């Protein structure tokens, strides 16, 4: 739960957090030929595979996994950008689909590269949506959420909520038990979206 923070402070280190087995394969090949020291964070538990061989992967380039309506024909514009990495991205996609049924539209971005961060995509999402939720299976301090907050503080500050481990040690348990215990599950992501949306409206 602390490895991303430890590795992203190392000078010149590339830090990758792939979201599923297919993206892990691509990240491994990319790391082998990128010419820089690279840390790849692998998940241990079985998780859904929701990218394909055709899904693009490039170090330093985030991917928009779910876009929301453009606003034409009376459709809702995106209200919140969910920016995540690793296996919890699947939960973020599920949360976004469920929120859409409630009239809340979200963009979901796969920020598989923590360092170098794709600042352009994150800034564009912040400008488009006006609020951000970061999602990661890691300590909130020093991980993806911190990297996103640092980027937005310098370029385009917006309200942000953090899904991650809140200054706690890891524990033993089944994946579902731990997701619930650390408040990393789909309902927690939905609650964070609603919380940041309320802050945005104020």
Image (spheres, rainbow, N blue to C red):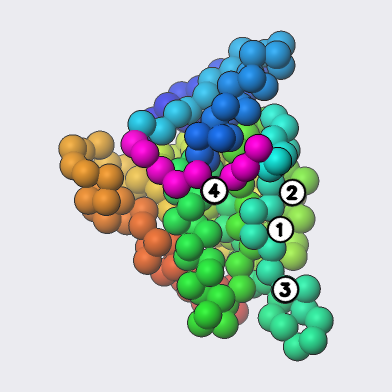
Is the C-beta separation of discs 4 and 2 under 8 Å? no
Q: Residue placed at 61% from the left, 67% from the top?
A: 106
Residue located beneath label 3 in the image: 69
Q: Quadrant of the C terminus?
A: bottom right
Q: Residue placed at 71% from the left, 16% from the top?
A: 34
Q: Is residue 91 above or below residue 146?
A: below
Residue located beneath label 1 in the image: 125
Estimate the spatial distance between the alpha carbons at disc 3 and disc 4, rounded to whole Å.
Answer: 21 Å
Estimate the spatial distance between the alpha carbons at disc 4 and disc 1, rounded to whole Å.
Answer: 22 Å
**Residue 195 colored magenta?**
no
Estimate the spatial distance between the alpha carbons at disc 3 and disc 2, rounded to whole Å.
Answer: 18 Å
Side of 40 where 166 appears, left or right? left
**The residue tagged with tag 1: helix, strand or loop?**
helix
Q: Position of residue 55 (x, y in %)?
A: 68, 42
Is the C-beta separation of discs 2 and 1 under 8 Å? yes
Is the C-beta separation of discs 3 and 2 under 8 Å? no
Residue located beneath label 2 in the image: 121
Residue located beneath label 4 in the image: 50
Q: Position of residue 80 (x, y in %)?
A: 61, 67
**The residue tagged with tag 4: helix, strand or loop?**
loop
**The residue tagged with tag 3: helix, strand or loop?**
loop
Residue 145 appears in the rendering = no
Q: Residue placed at 27% from the left, 45% from the top?
A: 175
Q: Which residues are magenta?
A: 45-53
Which badge, 3 or 4, comes first in the chain's sequence? 4
Estimate the spatial distance between the alpha carbons at disc 4 and disc 2, rounded to whole Å.
Answer: 21 Å
Which badge, 4 or 2, comes first in the chain's sequence? 4
């Amino acid at each position: 739960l602390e490895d991303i923070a430890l590795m992203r402070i190392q000078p010149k280190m590339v830090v990758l957090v792939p979201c599923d087995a297919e993206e892990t394969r691509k990240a491994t090949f990319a790391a082998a030929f990128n010419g820089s020291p690279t840390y790849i964070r692998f998940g241990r538990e079985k998780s859904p595979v929701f990218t394909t061989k055709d899904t693009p992967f490039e170090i330093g380039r985030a991917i928009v996994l779910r876009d929301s309506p453009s606003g034409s024909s009376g459709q809702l514009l995106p209200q919140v950008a969910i920016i995540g990495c690793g296996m919890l991205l699947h939960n973020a996609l599920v949360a976004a689909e469920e929120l859409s049924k409630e009239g809340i539209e979200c963009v979901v971005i796969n920020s598989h590269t923590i360092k170098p961060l794709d600042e352009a995509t994150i800034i564009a999402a912040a400008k488009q949506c006006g609020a951000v939720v970061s999602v990661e299976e890691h300590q909130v301090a020093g991980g993806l959420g911190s990297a996103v907050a640092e980027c937005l503080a310098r370029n385009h500050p917006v309200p942000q909520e953090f899904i991650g481990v809140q200054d706690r040690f890891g524990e033993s348990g089944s994946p579902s038990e731990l997701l619930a215990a650390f408040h990393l599950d789909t309902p927690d992501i939905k609650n964070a979206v609603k919380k940041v949306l309320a802050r945005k409206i104020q």
